[in-house]
Structures are given as C-alpha cells and as structure tokens.
Amino acid sequence: MLYLGLDLGTSALKAVVIDEDQHVIASRDAAMTSSHPRPGWSEQPPADWIAAAEAVMEALRAELGARMADIAGIGLSGQMHGATLLAADDRVLAPCILWNDTRSAEQAARLDADPDFRAISGNIVFPGFTAPKLVWLKETDPALFARVARVLLPKDYLRLWLTGEHVSEMSDAAGTAWLDTGARDWSDRLLAASGMDRAQMPALVEGTAPSGGLRTELAARWGMRPGTVVAGGAGDNAASGVGLGTVAPGDGFVSLGTSGVLFAACDAYTPRPETAVHSFCHALPGRWHQMGVMLSAASALAWFAGIAGATPARLIADLGEQVGPPSPVTFLPYLSGERTPHNDPGLRAGFHGVSAGTTREDMTRAVLDGVAFALKDNLDALQAAGTRPARLLAVGGGARSDLWLSIIAGVLGLAVDRPAAGAGGAAFGAARLGLIAAERADPATICTPPPVARRFEPDPGLSGACAAAQARFQRLRETTHPTPT
C-alpha cells in the first residue's frame, strides 16, 4: 500500500507519497504567494490552497497512474495559527489571516494580561495566534464577525475540502490560544473571553487517528478509493518532528529556515509560559513538545547576502572550512522582532564592534554567530522549562552548511546531526501519520529517526571563546533593547 502526506506551507504545498517501507516514491509541490495589503498584514485566499492541492494531486495521478488506488491513508500538515473564517454554509468570508500577521498585537496583549490564558493554554498569547485575530475582527468589523459560523486552521480547511468534515487535531489546535493544552480539549473559558464558543470550533482528534474519508467525487477524479482514511495530521513543526522521529523525551531538532526553531519532544505537560517557550501537544497521543521560535534565522543570512551583493553560499564559502573563534563583530539577528525568549516585536537587528579593519568575512561570521547565540538563548529557555535535549537533528536550508552546523554545535554545547539527504520533513511526517491512521500501526515502530549523514561535535578548545562571545551578545541585546518592565 501507499500513503500520502500533504503539507500546506506558506509559500508552497508539498505532496509526498511513501510505500509500506517508508520509501518516498513520488513528490510534487505547487508554489503559492501571500498578500500584504497593509503594513503588518499577511493573508492568503483559501481558494489558492485548493488550487495548489488540485495541481499536486493531478501531477501525482499523471505519474502514479493506477497506483493511486493503492493509497490507503492521507496525512495533513500545515502552517499554524491562521484564521480561516467560514459562514454557516462553509463559504469563506475573507482571506485567511496568517501566522505572521501582526495586526492583532494590541488584542493579543489584552488577552495575555488575563491570567487564565497562560494558565490554561500554557503559552503566551502571541499576535500571530488565532484567538487575538478574532478579537481584532470583532472590534474592527462586528458585522463580519457576527457571520463567522466556524473558524478552521489552514490545513483543516484543506481537510474540509477533502472529506466534508470540520475536524482539527491537538498539535495545531494548541497554537490557537483556545486549547486547554494539558487536557487536550477546547477551553470554554478561553473561547468565551474571545467572544467565541465551542460550536464555532472543529471537532478534535489525535494526529494519528482517522478524521474522515476522501469524498467520492475527488476519489473518482484522482483514481483513488472513496473513503480513503484522512488522518488528523499535525501542525508543521510537530509533523516535522514525526518525520524526523523526534517523539521521545530527549529527542530534538533545530530548524534553520526563514525562522529558527528549537524543538524538543516531551512525555509530560510542563508549561513555562514566562520563558516564551511554546508548549504544545505533539501529534502523538500522550505526547507534548516544547519549542523555542526565533523569527530570523537563515533569512538573516539571506538579508546580509543581499546587502553584500553575494549569495549566502558564496559568503559561507569565503569563510573557509575551518571553524575558528567567534567573530570580533557581534550581530543581533532581530530583523523582525523576536519570540523566544524575549517576546518583543520591537527588538531590532544590528552589527556592533565594526571598525575600519572589519571585513565582509567578519560580518558574515557575525551573522552565523548571532543566529547561533539566539538559538542558545532558546536552548536556555527550554532547559528552564525542564526540557533538555540530548542531541539535535538539523533541518532546513541553513543545515546544508557544515560550517554553520559546527558553529551551532559549539555554541549550544550539543552534538548536531545532519540527516541523510531527503530524510524527514513535514510532508513525510504527514504521510507517516496517514500510514498510522490507516493501518492502526504502532507509532513507535513507524516514527523512527532517519540515518545520520554527518555528526558535528562541539570543539572543547573553543568553548571559552564561545561563552565569552555569547555573554557579549547578551549584554549588547540588553543594552540596546532593555527588557520591558
């Protein structure tokens, strides 16, 4: 049998098909764009998600032919926090307000000041979360708010199209600020504080459980079986965790994409919202995860590459292969503010210690160091919350650099492993969840880690220099952007 994973990202929808041995036999993707009609706004029309899904499914049908009928399970993954607003007849009322939209910062601060939100959800109410978006809508367009019969997260709107069911799952729901994360259920108290009620929420299942079956019309169009099981699935980072086998205590991964993520699996719910660590349900029953999120990681290097008139790969190549002490220049990587551990959208980036003798190489190394130092702040926050990963898998575009992974290993004081090419990813994790739901398989036997292509160990000879540079980084951040009191 075969199993399909669909990952609805912000810039693309990716499809992966795996076989019973979890070998990838086909993959397709379709690009998408976001609109930014006002400063701080970020939106997508859900119709674009459906068009992208139709494109990848037609491409898979053309490649796999009659084997499409062998697909026994479908798993879904997707960008989190988005507010997809539906009328009573499931018609979309407005473009989806995305995770990186900050229009509801004022409303988020007010909700966060209500102690029940941190106590019940286990998290700070960030502007990107779903609940403050609905409060913003209620205050700015009460007529439209009154027409909202249901709110779905992005991947769950895709599920509605696939199955006709209004369903979400625990990992994605935990990012709304409406979930009682410890109880793994909607909180009537938090919903009421946002002007919402349970009837406007989708039903909840675990990520490994069936959530519905493929509609007959779509099955006929793609040569699949009607009623093909669609699993609960997961939010994008939890799906990546499933794809990487990051599901047991001590397992963790670092993602060097546009943003940076430090993710660690837990077998107990131990929130510490004051650290700005995200405490969410994992995609597997009885599992949670904690996550530090920084808003600029590989994007910081891409930004500097644009300033320097070079590609990121060229800048890194110019540094050579030998990992020396940190740069004498310090870079604060806060191009878009920061989440963990500062929860400060006003933080801004900057180079410090630049002199007449500073070279482009010094500044490039400072950018790589600065991202690593910010990740160390995230690791310290995770450890303060009781989560201590023993090692980290590295994923994302930045993980292709041996030098950067060596720097990160040294700064974090942890071994960092690069998986074998093509391993893991949110779409692969979604396919695994589809397999588990369809076959009622044991997650422990399915969610195994990938083979490691290379391990990067901390260099004990550089530990003192890394610690001193980290301390300088933290002093500069506090001096230039004092912690709000």
Image: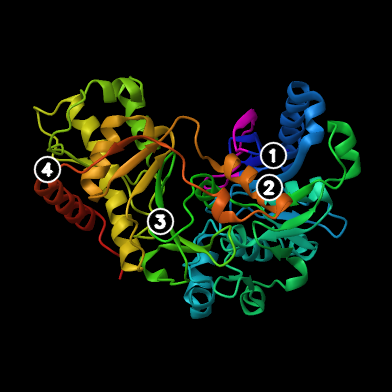
Comparing marks 3 and 1, which lies closer to the viewer?
A: 1
In space, the residues marked 3 and 1 are separated at their CA atoms by 33 Å
Quadrant occupied by the C terminus:
bottom left
Comparing marks 1 and 4, which lies closer to the viewer?
A: 1
Q: Position of residue 170 (x, y in %)?
A: 62, 62
Q: Earlier in the sequence, mark 3 or mark 2?
A: 3
Q: Earlier in the sequence, mark 2 or mark 4?
A: 2
Q: Crowding at label 3, few (<14), some or many (≥20) Cα neighbours within 10 Å?
A: many
Q: Earlier in the sequence, mark 1 or mark 4?
A: 1
- The disc placed on residue 339 is 3
**Relative to 444, is 373 on the left or the right?**
left
| Camera sees residue 9 | no
Residue pictured at 27% horizontal, 42% vertical: 408
**Three-letter amino acid code at the position of disc 3:** Arg
C-beta proximity under 8 Å, tags 1 and 2: yes
In space, the residues marked 3 and 2 are separated at their CA atoms by 32 Å
Q: Earlier in the sequence, mark 4 or mark 3?
A: 3
Residue pictured at 87% horizontal, 45% vertical: 215
Q: Position of residue 60 (x, y in %)?
A: 73, 27
C-beta proximity under 8 Å, tags 2 and 4: no
**Three-letter amino acid code at the position of disc 4:** Leu
Comparing marks 3 and 2, which lies closer to the viewer?
A: 2
**Three-letter amino acid code at the position of disc 1:** Leu
Q: Which residue is mark 4?
A: 462
Q: Nearer the viewer, residue 124 or 464?
A: 464
Mark 3, secondary structure of its residue: loop
